[in-house]
Structure formats: structure tokens, C-alpha cells
Image (cartoon, rainbow, N blue to C red):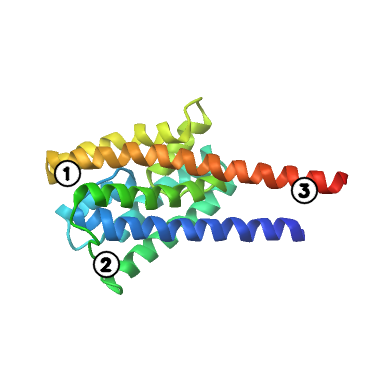
Amino acid sequence: MKKDNLISTIRDYIFITIGIILVAFGIQYFYAPNEIAGGGLSGLSLVISHYVPFLSVGTLIFLGNLILFVIAFILVGGDFGMKTIYASFALSFVMDFMEKVMHSHALTGNLLLAVIIGTIIIASGIGLAFAVNASTGGTDILAKILNKYSTINLGISLLIVDLVVVICGALTFGLDKGFYSLLAVIMNGLVVDRVIINIEKRRKEKSDKKAEELVA
């Protein structure tokens, strides 16, 4: 592996690691303790954990991701698959660590505040992963596939695949929390797109600046 490729790979995994920490923090300190099933495999795992309490959300995410990995390898490519495997294992580990070791709890009991802050944190993490051709796993994989084989952008793709989870959350935790879950999903799609756009814009600016320096 060339030095430039090694540096690029290390940078990508640093981005992914920061991303999964943000996602785990948002779920464990804002979503889960307030029963907000904000879409994705994490939201579905929260619903399942309600009915099967001896399985933690982190464990359920791990099991669910095992089923989806094959799809990522076949339809998206090996690079996306390897990065997503790392991100998914790490996310499950970090979430379980926060829950069982750090004893994560709600930082706010205000549902609207939990949705706003939690979604900004989680979507920023997802955006960082997507920006380096990775995913935090779960239904993000399905969103990436939908994005690759259609003209639908990632934000809308996430919205589409998350609606079913929101409905499940509403049936489990009540229509009131279902509404906040829907709000979280909509916000998540918008913030993810914004994060990716900003990252790509900065990359382009750096690339243009380096090109100008070479010419000079």
C-alpha cells in the first residue's frame, strides 16, 4: 500500500470512528432513554428490546447487521462492506460500553429537545461515515443501496427506509412518541445531506488550493 493510500485509509477510519461515537452517544443519551425510535436499525432494535428486555439495543444492532452485511458486499462493493463491518461492530461495542459501563441515561426529559439535539449528533455521525463511503450499518446500508441504484439522494433514501421503523415505534411507545420519532427521521435526512455537502465542499476547496500551489 502506497503512503498516500495508507494516510487516506487511516483518515477514513478516523472519520468513521468519530462518527460511530457520535451516533452511539446520541442514541444512548437522547433517543433510547426517551423511547424515541428515530428510524434505522437502532430504532427497530429499541422497539424489539422493549419486548425482549434481556437483549440490549447494542446486541440487537450487532445481530441485525450480520444479516445486512452480505447485501452490502454484493450490491455496494467490498470497500463499503469492510468499512461498514468495522463501523457496525464498533457501534455495537461503544453502545454496550456506554450502557453497561458508563450507565448512560437521558440528558434531558424534554422530548422535543431530545429529538433536536440527539438528531443533530446522530446525523452528524452518519454523515461522517457516508462521506468516506461507509455506513454505521443497519438500514443505512439499504439507504446507500437505494442511493446507488437510483437518483434519490441519501437524505431521502434514509427517510424512505426509516418510515416503517417509525410506525413500529408509534405502535409500541404511543402516537405521541411516534410523532417525535417521525420528526427525528425527517431532521436526520436533512442534517445528513448538509454534513456530506459541507465535507465535500471542504475537500474540493483543499483540492483546488493544492492544485493552485502546484501550478505556482
Place of residue 127 in the rendered image (x, y in percent of width and height, measured from the top left):
48, 46
Callout 3 secondary element? helix
Position of 161 compared to 198: left or right? left
117 up-or-down from 39: above or below: below
Q: Quadrant of residue 181?
A: top left
Place of residue 110 in the rendered image (x, y in percent of width and height, measured from the top left):
19, 52
In-front residue for pair 160/183 = 183
- Residue at image coords 13%, 38%: 175
Mark carried by residue 210 = 3
Inter-mark Cα distance, 2 to 3: 44 Å
Q: Nearer the viewer, mark 2 or mark 3?
A: 3
Q: Quadrant of residue 3?
A: bottom right
Q: Report the residue marked by disc 1.
A: 177
Residue sticking out furthest to the bottom? 101
Structural crowding at the residue carrying mark 1, measured as other residues with C-alpha within 10 Å and reported as few (<14), some (14–19) or many (≥20):
many
The quadrant in which the N terminus is found is bottom right
Callout 1 secondary element? helix
> Mark 1 or 3 closer to N-term?
1
- Residue at image coords 42%, 43%: 140
Q: Report the residue marked by disc 2.
A: 104
In-front residue for pair 21/47 = 21
Place of residue 49 in the rendered image (x, y in percent of width and height, measured from the top left):
20, 55
Inter-mark Cα distance, 1 to 2: 20 Å
102 up-or-down from 170: above or below: below
Q: Disc 2 residue type?
A: Ser
Position of 50 compared to 182: left or right? left
